[in-house]
Amino acid sequence: MAAAAWFNAPADVEAYRRLAAAVGEWNAYSAPQLENGDVDELLDDLADVAPPMPLGEGVADLEAVLRRQARRQL
C-alpha cells in the first residue's frame, strides 16, 4: 500500500517515508540475522566422529536393514 501511495503521489514525502519504512521492515523480516555471531558451529567436529561417506553406501546399508526387517515380518 505504501508503494501504491508513493507511486500515485511521488512528491509526497510522507508516502515515501512509509515506503522506506515498509521496505526496511520487510528486509529485516525476510533476512533475519543471528543475534550472537560468536557462537561455535555445532558440526565443527562431526568429521572426526563420523567421516563423510558416499551416499550409495548409506543407502545400501539402509536397504539391507529394511530387507531384513521385511523378511522377518513375512
Image (cartoon, grey):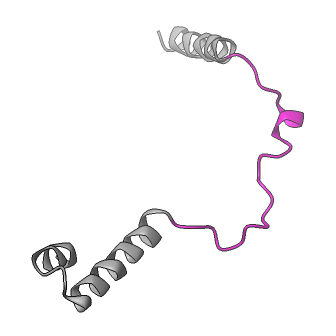
Question: Which residue is drawn at the image coordinates 78% and 65% (left, top)?
Answer: 39
Question: Vertical placement of 65 versus 40: above or below?
Answer: above
Q: In which quarter of the view is residue 26 placed?
A: bottom left
Q: Nearer the viewer, residue 2 or 71?
A: 2
Percent of width and height locating residue 34: 63, 68
Name of the residue lying farthest toward the bottom: 14
Q: Determine if the magenta segment contains residue 65.
A: no
The vertical placement of 49 against 35, above or below, is above
Name which residue lies at 86% across and 43% down: 45
Q: Is residue 73 left or right of residue 14?
A: right
In depth, the one of 53 and 30 nearer the eye is: 30
Residue 61 coordinates in the image, percent (x, y):
67, 14
Q: Quadrant of the N terminus?
A: bottom left
Residue in view at x 39 percent, y 76 percent: 25
Residue range highlighted in magenta: 32-54
Q: Quadrant of residue 23?
A: bottom left
Residue ranking furthest to the front: 11
Where's residue 46, x and y in %? 81, 39
User: Residue drawn 56% across and 16% down?
Assistant: 66
Q: Quadrant of residue 69?
A: top right
Q: Is residue 24 above or below residue 37?
A: below
Residue 47 magenta-highlighted: yes
Q: Is residue 65 left or right of residue 14?
A: right
The image shows residue 30 at horizontal and vertical percentages of: 42, 63
